[in-house]
């Protein structure tokens, strides 16, 4: 199985400040035939299902605010929220869809400082 | 806009079989553009992919659960189902159904999720 490890486990950021969450995979998620990274980011608020934010490591899902951005390639990836809003308080997960079984990071809890 | 809705018993006894159904609306489960998955989340914990099915009935399962899992599809009712046998307290979780786009033999991220249903395993 591909192991996904997120850092940190929790994060407190002031409103309007930048939040950065890291995700590392145990093997490369870069598919050579199309040069795409098979990595997605989700946001989960309490009592709700995960919501897709980013796919292909850096493509924002339709309707997701542009303060959310994804970067990275191979085994190291980052989700950045450029200016934290109160609505961004949530748990964030990375997920690889490179191979079966699909696996998720353990989650990063983002709070307001 | 596609919607997915899980349904089934919220309480299952140990050693019995957990059965859930996901009803898809606003889109056809027979569409060749998607795979359909089950994912679970124990309270306060992370997400675990259980398995997936295609319109043809082709399935893939998480090896950690493969011996106990069966996923089936009912295209006439636009539903797919999960059966998990020999359950224990460790199977207590919120169970989600989700959709993943596909392209030829490649399957991608989960772009639509159901609201989830809590299943508790207890006598």
Image (tube, rainbow, N blue to C red):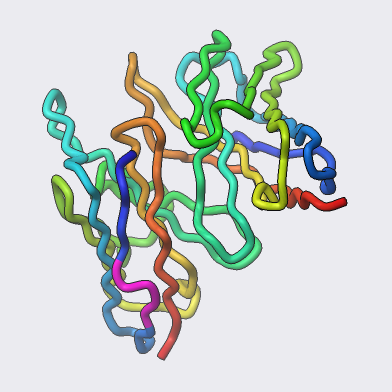
Residue toward you, A43 or A107:
A107
A10 in the magenta segment: yes
Residue at the farthest right position: B123
**Quarter where residue A76 is shown:** bottom left
Q: Quadrant of residue B25?
A: top right
Q: Main secondary structure of the magenta part?
A: strand
- The residue closer to the viewer here, B50 or A12, is B50
Front residue of B107/B94: it is B94
Residue B61: x and y, percent? 50, 27
**Left or right: B85 with respect to B34?**
right
Give the total of numbered labels.
0
Q: Is residue A15 left or right of residue A31?
A: right
* Rendered residue at 44%/86% (across/down): A112
Identify the residue at horizontal 26%, vertical 42% (top origin): A56
The correct choice, above or below, for B115 with respect to B106 in the image is below
User: Which residues make up the magenta segment?
Assistant: A7-11
Percent of width and height locating residue A60: 32, 50
Q: Residue at x 48, y 14 (%)?
A: B32
Q: Quadrant of the N terminus of chain B?
A: top right
* B19 is higher (above) or lower (below) than A24: above
Residue at horizontal 17 percent and vertical 41 percent from the top = A28
Query: Where's residue B28, x and y in %?
Result: 61, 20
Instruction: Estimate the x, y position of residue A32 in percent, counting from the top left.
Output: 12, 28
Direction top: furthest residue: B56
Task: Indicate whether residue A25 is drawn in magenta.
Answer: no
Residue nearer the viewer, B14 or B45? B14
Quarter residue B30 falls in: top right
């Amino acid at each position: 199985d591909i192991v996904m490890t997120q850092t940190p486990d929790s994060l407190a950021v002031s409103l309007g400040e930048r939040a950065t969450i890291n995700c590392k995979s145990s093997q490369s998620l870069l598919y050579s035939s199309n040069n795409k990274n098979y990595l997605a980011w989700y946001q989960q608020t309490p009592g709700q299902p995960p919501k897709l934010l980013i796919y292909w490591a850096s493509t924002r899902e339709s309707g997701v605010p542009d303060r959310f951005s994804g970067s990275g390639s191979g085994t190291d990836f980052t989700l950045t929220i450029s200016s934290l809003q109160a609505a961004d308080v949530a748990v964030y997960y990375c997920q690889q869809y490179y191979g079966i079984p699909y696996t998720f990071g353990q989650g990063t809890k983002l709070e307001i400082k | 806009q596609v919607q997915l809705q899980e349904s089934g018993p919220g309480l299952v006894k140990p050693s019995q079989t957990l059965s859930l159904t996901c009803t898809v609306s606003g889109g056809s489960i027979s569409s060749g553009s998607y795979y359909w998955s089950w994912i679970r989340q124990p309270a306060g914990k992370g997400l675990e992919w259980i398995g997936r099915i295609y319109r043809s009935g082709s399935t893939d399962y998480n090896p950690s659960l493969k011996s106990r899992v069966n996923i089936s599809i009912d295209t006439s009712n636009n539903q797919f189902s999960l059966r998990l046998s020999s359950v224990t307290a460790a199977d207590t979780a919120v169970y989600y159904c989700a959709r993943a786009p596909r392209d030829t033999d490649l399957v991608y991220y989960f772009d639509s999720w159901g609201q989830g249903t809590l299943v508790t395993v207890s006598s």
